[in-house]
Image (spheres, coloured by chain):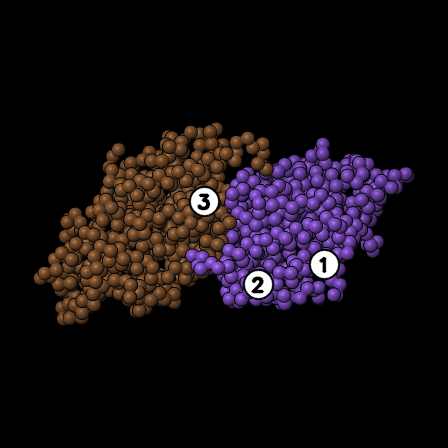
Chain colours: A purple, B brown
Amino acid sequence: MPEPNAQFLLSLLLSLLVHLLSSSLPSTCHPPPRFLTPHRRSFPRPTLRQPFSRYKYDTRYFDQDLDHFSFSDAGKYSQRYLVGDEHWVGAQRRGPIFVYCGNEGDIEWFADNTGFVWEIAPLFGAMVVFPEHRYYGVSMPYGSREGAYRDATTLSFLTAEQALADFAVLITHLKSNLSAEASPVVLFGGSYGGMLAAWMRLKYPHIAIGALSSSAPILQFEDIVPPETFYDIVSNGFKRESTSCFETIKKSWEALIEEGRKENGLQKLTKMFCLCRELKNVDDLVDWLSSAYSYLAMVNYPYPSSFLMPLPGHPIREVCKRIDGCANGTSILERIFEGVSVYYNFTGDVECFKLDDDPHGMDGWNWQACTEMVMPMSTSEDTSMFPPSEYDLSSFEEWCSSLFKVKPRSTWVTTEFGGHDIVATLKKFGSNIIFANGLLDPWSGGGVLQNISDSVVALITEEGAHHIDLRAATDEDPDWLIEQRQTEVNLIKKWLDDYNQARVGAVSVM
Amino acid sequence: MPEPNAQFLLSLLLSLLVHLLSSSLPSTCHPPPRFLTPHRRSFPRPTLRQPFSRYKYDTRYFDQDLDHFSFSDAGKYSQRYLVGDEHWVGAQRRGPIFVYCGNEGDIEWFADNTGFVWEIAPLFGAMVVFPEHRYYGVSMPYGSREGAYRDATTLSFLTAEQALADFAVLITHLKSNLSAEASPVVLFGGSYGGMLAAWMRLKYPHIAIGALSSSAPILQFEDIVPPETFYDIVSNGFKRESTSCFETIKKSWEALIEEGRKENGLQKLTKMFCLCRELKNVDDLVDWLSSAYSYLAMVNYPYPSSFLMPLPGHPIREVCKRIDGCANGTSILERIFEGVSVYYNFTGDVECFKLDDDPHGMDGWNWQACTEMVMPMSTSEDTSMFPPSEYDLSSFEEWCSSLFKVKPRSTWVTTEFGGHDIVATLKKFGSNIIFANGLLDPWSGGGVLQNISDSVVALITEEGAHHIDLRAATDEDPDWLIEQRQTEVNLIKKWLDDYNQARVGAVSVM
């Protein structure tokens, strides 16, 4: 199997995770709120075609209605989807169809980074389908990315509901084309894709019989979970490795601000942090460091990985070793730089760092965060290592207005998809959903962490980070990960068995 | 209690049922297909305010997003809703909220004709809410009916999904305003409103704990039920009263056509059927008769009623008596006229009949039928008493294009809401839905007629017609109707008990 183009993957992964975070880091008390934005540095933008993939699939396109929920003349767009059918046992044998709910990025990248689905497909004789999410990758309305992202009017159809309807229409079309109406569909998704998978199972039970929803913060809305949850988990990830590391980081912000206030302070910081351009504002450095810590918590995997950046196993441990290790003779800020270099420069190839070159880039996730995906986040002075910050909806609204001329609908997601009182709501409603969460992952704080019913279950791993279960198996997988994946396989098998059993000997289902 | 304004109710009822039927009667083999259109005769158009109601409620308005599923600048519209809270036990005691899913007509009319909900509200200490469906009654986007119905662009937001989202947003807002987040919501609906109630329970389980979906043909799509079902049930309604009546009607079409072909035949028919204007086309008379038979089947109630027209109890029996009774010395067509007069002129007040004065009126249900609610219907020569006709999607599309410049999405409803394989799909998914159907009602053919699970149940009455259970109790209610309503009350009570039980002693639901 050829190695994937690491550089390319990195760029995609980075862009994805940054998108996910960019609108959710705490705002400071200075309006307009700051949001972390992509740290692009030396990585190229995603190109339209990936040179090679480790999995075998066909790339196809489907004409979708741009607007499923009104009959305006919005027209069509071409949705890309990937199909791997080499293991499919066919329609006659009700061969299952595994659908990954494409999220906010290039679908080829998701296909390449969701090895689990490819690896279990042969066990089930399943076809694998990866539909791309509208407005990402090459699935662009209005002919191009530029056209699609022109303004609020062209962006207006970038919503989760429209994306789910795309999936529903596409799956119905594919099954009909293959005379595979009786083939059960199982959904997969990680992060926002995991939210889509869970919501799709709930909203379209006639389309899919179950969903593996991994690291999906479907409760990270309104006041369902405390707003400081995310950054508390990040902080705890550092504290569990080393209290002094946690304390050093916690103290570093004040040191940064003090340094920045000094004469030539910004110049000194520029040099100390090896920045390519002179620092104009300490806040930019604060963001750059904060985002590194958050990403480190997300990808705090037990083995070396290149999910976001090339990193050692247990990367937070490594960061803290460096922060704690050179205590003698080095300042707090020098130690912070040493630590963060694990994240930004583990390979040692980087000559200088660009903090950010496009602070207000109109990217898709910012649009989604400014419309539906309003996730309140703050940091607590007591429990986190981050600078304290409040969540402030009106500052956020101002930011969205300046960026897109759009007003967030901050209560819409819970109205449309629920979230409040979810255990009682779904106890006797719905079935066949796995909410998988690793507790090291800061997004797990907004996840479903308790079993809801016999078949709507929470699968929690103490040592897991952001949807590690969906990644390809490696030789270094710890036992708990192997077990987690086996549990997922067993549950999916049960869904399929139940489905087939209900249809054996059935004279007529209606 | 004051008597409702019968004339007004009639006009509304007529308009409602005609809407429901108008796009679903069989097309003939002559394109463009004919559709039954409102027979308005001497009844006035609905006025904006009903002079009095038999139930006590406040009328309120709520600013709704016109487009819930995209972020275009479609703006807002003012949705009317009626609130009756005199029996509500309040938020503290988790007083239930009964919501009737307004369908394609003026909400005051639905409120006045859904006595069941008002009558059981005191038993449950429930608040009653009747939200109006967008684009009906006074809930008009673009400032007025004229503005809303101007063209396909202004009509484009008239969809079931948008209406359901309206209900979801409104209910969430009401509960929040009353601090009644813990109050359980139960949905009610008849006909298209029953479809909305069932779909809403399935799509928004976090908003409503259960739904009484009465006479809701949610399976009247694509090939889920045979297209001839509706007219077969109408025909059987006549056959069960009298085979000779059925046969006479079946033979009458040929007699009509023959008569129409004769010299002065149309003139003669005009006189025979007491038409106000000279008949130009036999087809118009065919439609006028066909629709009367269909409506008679829908309102074939066991007691005298004024649901659609002032009618005796068992009106089909009365029609057939007249058709069969005067066999000597009268022609088939004279007998048909005698029979149909039961429907169109039971009071004997009508001097002449207008077949139709607005064959292509842009009414809301026609729009919905031309976009989402594509219900294939045909008539069978073997089993029905109607002239044979095929269902022809392309003729239908032409008609919709000529009427609205819109193309129906004929497979959308089943993609969005399901329908195929419904028993297996919902067997382990969903809960708390009653599908109530009376088998005399031709819409029951597209209804759910078997239990799906313990709490998704079919409640069938052999002698029931179109959502009679939702009407106010009368002294003449037969035992089966009293029992049906009691069963519904018991089931709703169980839903509420389950809901409250799950919350007693719960430390934290999430």
**For mark 1, does the 10 Å Cα neighbourhood hold few (<14), some (14 to 19), or many (20 or more) residues?**
many
Q: In whole angstroms, how far apart are the C-alphas of marks 1 and 3?
A: 49 Å
Query: Image quadrant of residue A71?
Result: bottom left
- The residue to which callout 2 is attached is A95
- Asked if the residue at tag 3 contacts the one at tag 1, i.e. Cβ–Cβ closer than 8 Å, the answer is no
Label 2: how many residues lie within 10 Å, few (<14), some (14-19) or many (20+)? many
Residue A222 % position (x, y): 58, 39
In space, the residues marked 3 and 2 are separated at their CA atoms by: 31 Å
- Position of the N terminus of chain B by quadrant: top left
* Residue toward you, A256 or A58: A58
Label 2 near label 1: C-beta < 8 Å?
no
Q: Which residue is label 3 attached to?
A: B455
Please state which of residues B200 and B57 is positioned toward the viewer in this rendering. Answer: B200
Q: Nearer the viewer, mark 1 or mark 3?
A: 3
Res A480 seen here: yes
Q: Residue furthest left?
A: B329
Tell me which label, 1 or 2, sits earlier in the chain.
1
Mark 2 residue element:
loop
Confirm whether circles 3 and 2 share one chain: no
Q: Furthest residue to the right?
A: A329
* Of marks 1 and 2, the one in the foreground: 2
Which amino acid type is shown beneath numbered disc 2? Answer: Gly
